[in-house]
Image (cartoon, helix red, strand yellow):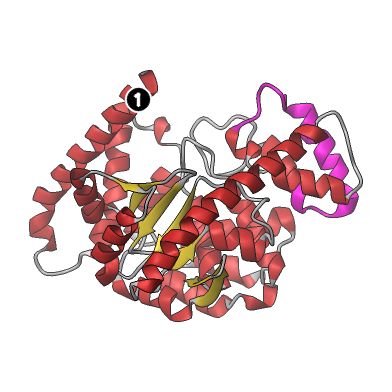
Amino acid sequence: MFQSERLPWPSPWPTTSQLRLLQTLFGPDARALDHYAGWRAAVDVEHDLDSASYRLLPMLDARLRALGVSDDFSGRYKGVHRKTWVDNSLLFSDVAEVLAALTQAGIKPALSKGAPLAMLHYRSHALRPMSDVDVVVREQDLARAEAIIAGVPGWSRMGDRQREIARRYHHSINFDGRKGGIDLHWHFLFEARAAAVDDWFWNGARRFDFLGVEVLCPAPTALLLTVIVHGLRSNPASPIRWVADAVSILRADPAAIDWKELQAFAHRHRLGHRLGLGLHYLRTHFEAQIPAEVPERLLAGRRSLVERIENTMYLGDPSAFLGSKRRLLWRGFVQYLPVLKARTGAGLLLRLPVRLPHFMRYVLVMYRQRRNASHA
């Protein structure tokens, strides 16, 4: 149902070979070498390794060494493992300086996704490659946080026009540093940007020591929801790392997940179907410690119109019924749905005919910029 060797669109579900690699990492020891042999037989590691699988090589190195296995490519896996340790160490060192500046100014930031996953759930930042760190601040602190980060040597932010558009339509602003980037968020979730959603994350956040700077990070329940909902979104760079992230959270401390609260939150904010699909996949393929009734209830729940529209783009194959230009405009509309969900009020429908075309123009401009960059 979920995987095939060559999917016709940028699907969030692993292909057959990617699934073999993931099962090498997370399957039982007795089957791990069989999965690895199947993966090696299907993939040319030297010449045809996709970027999503490449990001799993540090974990593959650690897994094979734990099993006492070595082959012709062990040196390559070890090299990627070491490179990840160096790259993340340099990135984290730069980000720690930024976090210290924020906390000294009275802003209490949170880290989401990659950094807390690597340090708290993978138990080693050398196992999870990342190009940026997701830093979250409360919306009222956004302007100050922007100015503080821009004032730290080595960091530069997006231009004024790009920041204006990002504030209006997105949930984060990008900063470029010497060894990677920072995504400065004022909402935890792209799909749900309401104050009640952010309050749920902040109220449950836990203290987290990041290289000597005390920050916050989402509780395991919130982090699990984040990686599944964020990961189950079609992307040109196959986002299969959501599987590794979710399994690592579940294995680090299964008892830390509040399943009742997770279901209630997902239903409340119209995220239940995608979350249910992800949990079902993890339980089916990786024997994850997920109560059977949780994905069953999530998938049995009634899907809102917004969820159905989002799933058409993020989980289905839009090329089956839309040409490339129409697909681009459809994707733009789907990306506008979180804006609609966040902006309720009596005048919303009256403002929609003006605001939506403006957003679609932005989508077309970004598409042209990316296309020109790829041809440069």
Where is residue 243? Give x, y as percent: 62, 52
Where is residue 76? Give x, y as percent: 75, 33
Amino acid type of the residue tagged 1 in the rendering: Ala
Q: Identify the secondary structure beneath mark 1.
A: helix
Closer to the camera in the image, 55 or 316: 55
Closer to the camera in the image, 326 or 75: 75
Picture layout, residue 231 above or below residue 116: above
Magenta residue check for 165: no
Closer to the camera in the image, 164 or 305: 164
The secondary structure making up most of the magenta span is helix
Picture layout, residue 20 above or below residue 271: above
| Residue 279 in view | no
**Count the marks: how many?**
1
Residue at position x 40%, y 36% from top? Answer: 318
Magenta residue check for 38: yes
Horizontal arrangement in the rendering, residue 232 relative to residue 164 (left or right): right
Residue at position x 37%, y 32% from top? Answer: 321
Residue under circle 1? 373
Where is residue 344? Give x, y as percent: 19, 67
Residue at position x 87%, y 53% from top? Answer: 29
Residue farthest to the front, as pictured = 153
Residue 109, image quadrant: bottom left
Near mark 1 (Cα within 10 A), the count class, few <14, some 14-19 or many ≥20, is: few
Image quadrant where one finds the N terminus? top right
Picture layout, residue 233 above or below residue 262: above
Closer to the camera in the image, 369 or 305: 369
| Residue 362 in view | yes
Q: Which residues are magenta?
A: 25-50
Where is residue 95? Give x, y as percent: 47, 56
